[in-house]
Image (cartoon, rainbow, N blue to C red):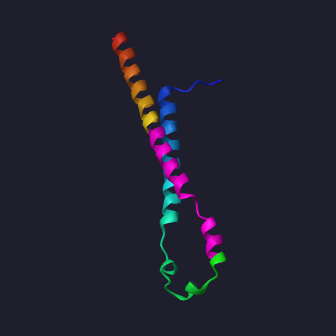
């Protein structure tokens, strides 16, 4: 069993947080796109409401995406704290050895 360094764990957590935040931001952007049909402009205005409901159910949940974005923020902050603590610990060990 290999034990990772605290710095490597922090960096890994930071990378995961970045990926999760990007995905959540993409989900939010997908929900916020506005098309001309939303305002009754164009020939698509005459479509059946069932078609609109079916297409809206395929969109990611906006609330869930917002929560995921906040979770990614806290994960990034925690990972930064891990990296800072590992840096301080390494500095203390070097000071003790010197």
| The C terminus - image quarter | top left
Q: Is residue 23 visible?
A: no
Picture layout, residue 93 above or below residue 18: above
| The N terminus - image quarter | top right
Residue at 55% x, 85% y is: 45
Picture layout, residue 9 above or below residue 34: above
Tag count: 0
Residue at 48% x, 46% y is: 18
Q: Tell me where residue 16 appears, x and y as whole percent.
A: 53, 43
Most common secondary structure along the magenta stretch:
helix
Residue at 43% x, 37% y is: 77
Residues shaded magenta? 51-76
Picture layout, residue 88 above or below residue 36: above
In the image shown, does 53 or 81 lie closer to the viewer? 53
Picture layout, residue 74 above or below residue 33: above
Residue 93's image quarter?
top left
Q: Tell me where residue 27 appears, x and y as whole percent.
A: 53, 59
In the image shown, does 19 or 98 lie closer to the viewer? 19
Q: Can residue 8 be seen in this view?
A: yes
Q: Tell me where residue 69 appears, x and y as whole percent.
A: 48, 49
Q: Tell me where residue 12 appears, x and y as whole percent.
A: 52, 37
Outermost bottom residue: 43
Residue 54's image quarter?
bottom right
Residue at 47% x, 46% y is: 70
Q: Is residue 52 magenta?
A: yes
């Amino acid at each position: 069993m290999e034990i990772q360094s605290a710095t490597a764990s922090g960096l890994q957590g930071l990378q995961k947080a970045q990926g999760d935040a990007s995905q959540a931001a993409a989900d939010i952007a997908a929900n916020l796109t506005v098309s001309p049909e939303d305002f009754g402009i164009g020939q698509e205005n005459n479509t059946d409401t069932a078609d609109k409901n079916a297409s809206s159910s395929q969109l990611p949940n906006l609330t869930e995406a917002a929560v995921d974005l906040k979770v990614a923020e806290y994960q990034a902050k925690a990972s930064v704290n891990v990296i800072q603590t590992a840096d301080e610990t390494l500095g203390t060990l070097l000071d003790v050895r010197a």
